[in-house]
Image: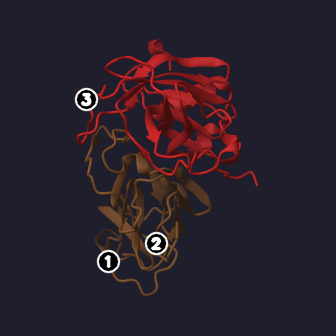
Chain colours: A brown, B red
């Protein structure tokens, strides 16, 4: 529906999509920018080469995943912002309530994983990334303690469309 | 949405638009839908707390409400679907823990009490809530939740107490409101 409103009407292959980006931290860093720089990253650090989806691709974000080995972990309060184009689509979102098992997760069926290094949140609303529109994410951690060369990864999971030659030529 | 008007499976965004229409918020339907969580903390141990009120004077990580405090900006709103309570670890409010306490609270929006003397019982949702070995500190609002409209002050009055003895507990308290949100989206006006 969103693609149609934007005039991006080319049919594509429907799929499940997962995009991610990793940032290697500097000592003491608590603010992280994702989907901003891609140079020099391995295919396990990011599966994108630019912060736009291709002209025939789009995506709906349903879940947000973070994995890290920063010293302080992900249990402290956090502020996640996602911007698509010039529109903030997720504002000051706190991931910490779903981290570990403290009985305050958003989801009724929560993994309760004890480690502080991983967290995933299922969204209530569809967040659309249309084709050829810049997107970015920023994450602020309340707790310090990050050491140099520690890594933090933000993943966006959902469904979408990818290029399908079969129906377009 | 009043129960008499509920026909079939009413969803969160249906309720937001219904209430917005009743309040005359004609532009809300053009805004950006989102998932939102707002929280506030009282990091001084006490037997009763008022949360969200005066949040404009607090900054992250004590709260994520920002400079507007306990009112949403124009064309921002939150349909509260879950409410949870937690215990800040320290005065800095950077991290938190669960507890064995329960919490009796009122939710007040504008000059109206919309939830009165409600209790989040420790492990009170264990029939359908699984968070490992931790007891739930969350309450799911019945129906499709309660809307906090733009530019109306809201607050929570809460008293922590020991669940099994029903005695008052002096403790730090934090609270989050989670649900479907609306964010300002300029389409054509600037």
- The residue located at (70%, 40%) in the rendering is B74
Label 3: which secondary element: loop
Which residue is denoted by mark 2 in the rendering?
A: A55
As measured in the structure, the alpha-carbon distance from the residue carrying label 3 to the one carrying label 1 is 38 Å
Image location (x, y in percent) of residue A122: 36, 48
As measured in the structure, the alpha-carbon distance from the residue carrying label 2 to the one carrying label 1 is 24 Å
Image location (x, y in percent) of residue B133: 23, 40
Return the chain for callout 3.
B
Whether pointer 2 and pointer 1 mark residues with C-beta atoms closer than 8 Å, the reply is: no
Image location (x, y in percent) of residue A87: 60, 57
Which residue is denoted by mark 3 in the rendering?
A: B126
Which residue is denoted by mark 1 in the rendering?
A: A44
Return the chain for callout 2.
A
- The residue located at (47%, 56%) in the rendering is A128
Whether pointer 3 and pointer 1 mark residues with C-beta atoms closer than 8 Å, the reply is: no
Q: Is residue A4 above or below residue B155?
A: below
Label 2: which secondary element: loop
Pointer 3 and pointer 1 on the same chain: no
Q: Nearer the viewer, residue B13 or A54?
A: B13
Q: Is residue A168 above or below residue A90?
A: below
Tell me which corner region of the image, top left, top right, bottom left or bottom right, holds residue A155: bottom left
Tell me which corner region of the image, top left, top right, bottom left or bottom right, holds residue A152: bottom left
Label 1: which secondary element: loop
Counting the numbered discs, the total is 3
Q: Nearer the viewer, mark 3 or mark 1?
A: 3
Tell me which corner region of the image, top left, top right, bottom left or bottom right, holds residue A45: bottom left
């Amino acid at each position: 529906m969103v693609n149609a409103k934007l005039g991006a009407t080319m049919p594509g292959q429907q799929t499940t999509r997962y995009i991610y980006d990793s940032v290697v931290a500097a000592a003491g860093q608590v603010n992280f920018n994702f989907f901003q720089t891609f140079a020099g990253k391995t295919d396990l650090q990011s599966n994108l080469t630019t912060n736009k989806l291709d002209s025939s691709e789009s995506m709906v974000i349903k879940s947000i995943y973070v994995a890290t080995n920063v010293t302080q972990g992900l249990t402290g309060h956090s502020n996640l912002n996602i911007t698509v184009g010039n529109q903030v689509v997720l504002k000051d979102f706190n991931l910490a309530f779903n981290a570990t098992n403290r009985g305050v997760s958003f989801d009724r069926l929560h993994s309760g994983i004890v480690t502080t290094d991983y967290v995933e949140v299922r969204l209530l609303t569809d967040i659309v990334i249309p084709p050829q529109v810049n997107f970015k994410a920023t994450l602020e951690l309340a707790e310090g303690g990050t050491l140099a060369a520690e890594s933090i990864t933000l993943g966006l999971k959902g469904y979408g469309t990818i290029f399908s030659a079969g129906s377009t030529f | 949405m009043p129960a008499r008007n509920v026909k079939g499976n009413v969803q969160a965004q249906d309720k937001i638009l219904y209430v917005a229409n009743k309040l005359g918020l004609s532009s809300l339907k053009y805004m950006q839908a989102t998932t939102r969580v707002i929280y506030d903390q009282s990091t001084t141990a006490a037997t009763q707390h008022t949360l969200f009120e005066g949040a404009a004077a607090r900054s992250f990580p004590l709260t994520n409400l920002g400079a507007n405090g306990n009112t949403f900006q124009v064309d921002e709103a939150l349909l509260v679907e879950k409410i949870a309570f937690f215990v800040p670890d320290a005065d800095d409010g950077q991290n938190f823990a669960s507890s064995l306490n329960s919490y009796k609270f009122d939710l007040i929006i504008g000059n109206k009490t919309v939830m009165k003397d409600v209790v989040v019982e420790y492990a009170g949702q264990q029939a359908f809530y699984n968070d490992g070995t931790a007891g739930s500190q969350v309450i799911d609002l019945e129906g499709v939740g309660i809307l906090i409209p733009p530019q109306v002050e809201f607050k929570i009055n809460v008293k922590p107490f020991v669940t099994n003895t029903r005695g008052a507990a002096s403790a730090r308290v934090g609270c989050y409101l989670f649900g479907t949100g609306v964010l300002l989206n300029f389409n054509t006006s600037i």
